[in-house]
Amino acid sequence: MAPSPNDHPGDAPRPGRLRRGRVVLVALLAALFAWVTSGIYTVAPSERAVVTRFGRLAAKKDRPGIHYALPWPIDRVYTPETTDVKRIEVGFKNLGQLFSEPRRSDALTGDENILKIMMVVQYKIRDVERYLFRVEEPPWLVERAVETAMNLRVASLPVDDVLTDAKARIEIDTIAIAQGWLDAYQAGIVLLRGNLQTVSPPVPVLDAFNEVTDAKKDAERMIDEAREYEGKVVPQARGEAHEIVKRAEGYLNERTNQARGEADRFLSVLAEYRQARDITRTRLYVEAMEDLLSKMEVLISDGTSEITIVE
Amino acid sequence: MKGNLVIGIAAVALALIVWSTLFTVHETEYAIVTRFGDPQRVIDQPGLHLKLPWPIDSAVYFDRRLLVLDKPAPGEPPKEYLTLDKKNIEVASYTCWKIEDPLQFLETVGTRADAEAALGDVVAAELGKILGRNELANLLSIETAALRLDEIMGEIRDTCRAVAADEYGIEIVDFRIKRVNFPEQNRASVFDRMRAERKRIATRYRSEGSEEASKIRSDADKKRREILATATRQAEEITGRAEAEATRIYAEAFGQDPEFYEFLRTIDSYKKALTRETTIILRSDSPYLRLLNSIDAILGPAATPPGKAATAEADATEGAHGPVTE
């Protein structure tokens, strides 16, 4: 066996061995360099960084940019997105979701009706330390808490309210209740808002619910038609009333004018008459008789026989 | 060469032994150091820790985070419960728990799966007991006074909390009833009830609508009649005024010579009343025929036929001359 360079440090190393030693050295240096630089990490503006050293919380970095942590296995860096709004579907038909149960999840209302309800909840990380270290699976907890709060709220309301005007109230109350619980669990999460996306009766009774909607529409239509009738009849009556009054006023005018005319005629005749009473009287009488008798058939009797008028 | 190898192996072995005396405990964990399997101490501070090298000491880790237990677990069939008023319901719940005393936990249940099985049993038993003392209306009601869901959850949480802390070193942080459902076989009758209720509501809407509509219609009709009646009354007043005015005008004018008015009016009325179709019989001694009579007296009593009127007139003219000449 040839003596190794290590055994005989005084000897000049052989060229082949020298080269191999160098390669090993370079490789070692490169590995060391890579190991040291693996501690470099960046924090995006939407992220917060949390560093643990040997598992213990060591540093929190709020500033975005480039940072350095000691390489594995000493330090470990977590960079959760804190400004990012996360979204989760809670309740009915969330079967595709990661943490939900693969069976139907109906809600029961206060008056024991079955409804399908689905709420979309938006949330954000409020406390990175709690979010990362205090709770096993924060999104999972969000889903549980929100679903429970939502069902709790629905359990106190009649089905008609849930389907119509209580939606906003349910959304607000659900978020408030669930937020209280999540705070108690130290989940480090803030719920931003909940939107009820699906609120619907189950398919087998959908027709019956639609029937109610139709009935409501029918009732509204009947009332609208009646209002239309009212809107037509009342102005019409006002028009008629106006006409009746105007007709009477016309009559008043006509009648007084007629009376005045007759009176005037009488007065003028009277004036004439007063000038020559007998002559005027006779003239008027004879003129009238002439006018009359010229138009009629005239029989003259001797006054002794009976007068019979035959129609 | 052989010496080199031995030294190398010894160095590596030494390094491994030294390495195995070090262990880290994460923020999310507890560790228990066991000596040949016998628990020695609990480490609840995260960071780097020392122990005797393998195989003497080893570290066992436990989750110290809040854990969630679903009941029924995903994939598990739902569990039915009976309420006080003998109604079958399915209840889904979740329990938040964490390991409070790792040593006790290790000694009693040991693993998470066993712990959750034990917890699940405690929760289910407690749920059965408490639901059996409550009516369905205590879980679901539109009367806030009847609704006891919060108290029920609180009772179950407190009982389970005491049991879990005593027996398993587990802290129950919260217990919540996620959902109450009717079992599959009861749904058909629930749907029937819902349908009947909807039908009733639909009928009510329709009859209320038609009631309201006919109220509006009859109100409108009433208004219409009122408007027309007012107008008619007004019109009659005006007509009356017209008559009164006319009467006044007439009286004023005719009052100046009532006798002449009577005469004039009579003549006028003749003109109006006696028309072309009328036949009038005049007595030969009527004032109008007085002149005619005097002519008769001149010509003699024979009736003059209409055809000979001209002759008679001519005769009369002649006759008229007669007396003058006579």
Image (tube, rainbow, N blue to C red):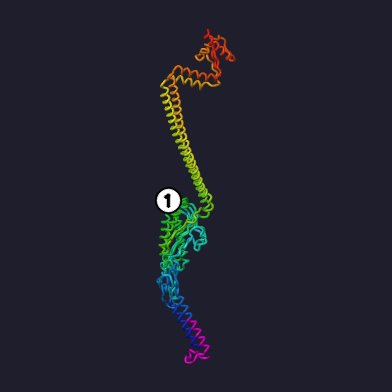
Q: What chain is tagged by disc 1?
A: B
Is residue A296 rendered magenta in the image?
A: no
Is residue A16 rendered magenta in the image?
A: yes
Closer to us: A124 or A249 = A249
Image spot of residue B163 (x, y percent)? 42, 62
Per the image, the residue denoted by label 1 is: B143
Closer to us: A5 or A215 = A215
Residue found at the far front of this picture: B325
**Vertical placement of B316 versus B78: above or below?**
above
Identify which amino acid the numbered label 1 is placed on: Glu
Image spot of residue A285 (x, y percent)? 48, 18
Q: Residue at x 50, y 85 (%)?
A: A22
Neighbor class of circle 1 (other Cα within 10 Å; few <14, some 14-19, many 20+) is some
Residue found at the far top of this picture: B326
**Vertical placement of B223 versus A138: above or below?**
above
Image spot of residue B268 (x, y percent)? 48, 21
**Picture quadrant of residue A76:** bottom left
Q: Is residue B23 visible?
A: no
Residue found at the far right of this picture: B307
Closer to us: B323 or A136 = B323
**Picture quadrant of residue B241:** top left
Image spot of residue A229 (x, y percent)? 49, 41
Q: Is residue A189 visible?
A: yes
**Vertical placement of A38 versus A227: above or below?**
below
**Vertical placement of B322 versus B13: above or below?**
above
**Picture quadrant of residue B39:** bottom left
Mark 1 lies on a secondary structure that is loop
Q: Which residues are magenta?
A: A1-29
Q: How many marks can you see?
A: 1
